[in-house]
Each structure stands twice: as structure tokens, then as C-alpha cells.
Amino acid sequence: MMAAQPTLTIGSRGSQLALWQAHYIAGQLAEAGFDTRIEIIKTTGDHLQTASLTQAGGKGLFTKEIEEALLAGHIDLAVHSLKDLPTESPEGLTIAAVPLRASPFDAIVGERLAELERGARVGTSSPRRGAQLRILRPDLRIEPIRGNVDTRLKKQHSGEFDAILLAAAGLERLGLGDEIAEVFEPDQICPAPGQGALGVQTRDHGEALEICKLLNHESSNQAVRAERSVLAGLGGGCQLPVGAFALVGGDTMTISGIVVAPDRPLLIRSQTTGKARNAEDLGKWIADDLLWQGAEEMLVPEK
């Protein structure tokens, strides 16, 4: 007799978007012949109501408790938005797969950027988006906004904000693509490293690791490895607004990265092209070039 396939437990936050992601991976595993169940885990970030996640600790707020459950063996895998995952996995854990990436770009809801009136209120929870938007439109009032996607949309619809910035992938995954007024090109607003990509995290050995490797999409994996290498080269939990975008075509990759000053209209940019198999090295080159251009000094407030 053939041994029964294991039922894999997927750990997920309880938000609408996180559950969409968990069910998506469950569907991919079902197609490969594996049964799953989803366990909802509350994270530190879910309990916070402050306006600034950066002040509360930034990356890791939405992953710590899930990773602890994975290490303890309470779940077999976790599905993360890669842009929310720290660049270094805890000892004993690994990213087993990066499935086919959705749109990595940022979107504006409400009106197109050029159509917003002077002084319009624009909401974003991301220092990276806000800093780049201030360079594009210094006349706008850019203010923090918290809550899940639905909460933010309600705030915009009610007139609390004239527009809000969100990841295009999140809106599209929730069937809200019609809300998008404009999607930004990466030379307008450079995305967060790993934005639009999911990371399937498992323990670094065992059956779940081998099963989840079946879900990997290699060019998506190469792109986000390069982008995350930019962030790692700048310090991982860097306080600066950092963007990175890699485009893979065949065995070639073009990657660009930006760092924006948090307190003044100053942006530095770097770009290079190389072999996609050298993803981490290309990302590290971008980080080194940004540092050479003065990324560290941009942490110092302007006198």
C-alpha cells in the first residue's frame, strides 16, 4: 500500500489578504496532490493601532509569532508577503519557494497623481512611498494611514483622504483592481524589495521543505533574491526608505535600487545588469553603490 500523503498545516494571519495568500498556496499544493489546513495566528502587528509601524519596529511585526509556531512544529509552513519578511530567516527556517510573482508595483486609489489638486491629502503607511511621492508632488499633504485594505479604502471613499497609495498586487488579489486610478512605473515610485511576491517558509529540513519546493517559480525567486540582497546590503532593517526592482529576461537580470532621504527631497539611484543566476551579487553591488553615493549620510537630518 502507498503511504498516505501528509496534511500540511499552513500558518497565516487572519487578515483578508493574508488568508487569500494562504488559500492560494493551499490551492497550489492541492493541485500537486497534497491536503492542507489553515491555522490563524495573531501577530504583534495585528495588535498595534499606532500610526507608524516603523516606530514600532517595522519588519518582523507580522511574522514573529508565525515563525515561532513554525520552529515549534505547530505548523508546517507559513505564507508571507516577502516585502514584510526580514532579510535574514531565523536559524532553522528557510524560504522553500517563491511562487509566480504578481505585480510588484505601487498604485494610487482616488485620482491619478497628475489630477490631484494642490494640497490634496494622500494616505500611505509606507515611508518609502511617501518619500518618493514628496519628490514627485511636493505640494501634496502626505499623511499616515493604518488598517487593512478594506479599512483604508473606506477612509478614502468617505473623503478622509483624497487618494491613498497601496500595493497593486494586494488590490488585485482581493478583486479590487477597479479601485486603481494609476499604477506607478518603477522610475516614478520604486517598489519595496520583494513586493508582489509570496514567500513560502518552512523549517530548513524535512518533508514540508521538499514538498513546498514544487511551488517555486525560478525567475520570480531570482528577482526577489536580488532585491532583498539590496536591502540586506544596506543593513537589513534599514531605517531609510529603500526601493528595489529586478527584471529577469531569460538568463539576464536588470536591477535598480533607490534610497530616499526621510526628511528632505533627496533620492539616489543605482542600476546594473548581469546574469540572473548571480542574483545576490547583483543586489549587493547595488547596495554598495548606493552606500558609495552617500546612503549612510542621508540618515543625518539636514542642518
Image (cartoon, rainbow, N blue to C red):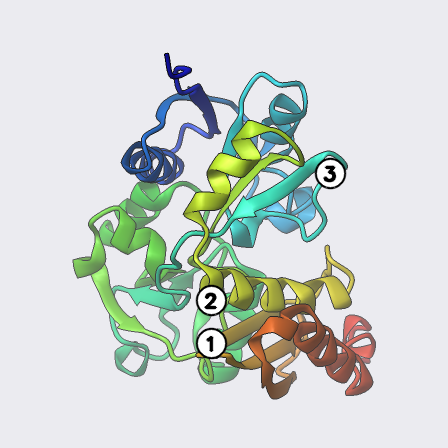
Kindly identify which residue carries mark 2.
Answer: 219
- Relative depth, front residue between 129 and 290: 290
> Which x, y percent locates residue 28?
32, 40
Task: Give the alpha-carbon distance from disc 3 to disc 1, as whole Å.
Answer: 28 Å
Crowd tier of the residue under label 1, counting other residues whose Cα lies within 10 Å: few below 14, some 14–19, many 20 or above: some
> Which x, y percent locates residue 139?
45, 80
Residue type for callout 3: Pro
Q: Earlier in the sequence, mark 1 or mark 2?
A: 2
Kindly identify which residue carries mark 1.
Answer: 248
Residue type for callout 1: Val
Mark 3, secondary structure of its residue: loop
Residue type for callout 2: Ser
Going by the picture, which residue comes out furthest to the left?
A: 178
> Which x, y percent locates residue 14?
41, 28
Residue 80 appearing in the image: no
- Relative depth, front residue between 238 and 244: 244
Q: Is residue 19 left or right of residue 255?
A: left
Q: Earlier in the sequence, mark 3 or mark 2?
A: 3
Mark 1, secondary structure of its residue: strand
Q: Nearer the viewer, mark 3 or mark 2?
A: 2
Q: Are marks 1 and 2 in contact (CB under 8 Å)?
A: yes
Task: Give the alpha-carbon distance from disc 3 to disc 2, as whole Å.
Answer: 24 Å
Q: Residue at x 44, y 82 (%)?
A: 188
> Which of the 4 image quarters holds residue 112?
bottom left
The quarter of the picture where the N terminus appears is top left
Q: Which mark is residue 90?
A: 3
Crowd tier of the residue under label 3, counting other residues whose Cα lies within 10 Å: few below 14, some 14–19, many 20 or above: few
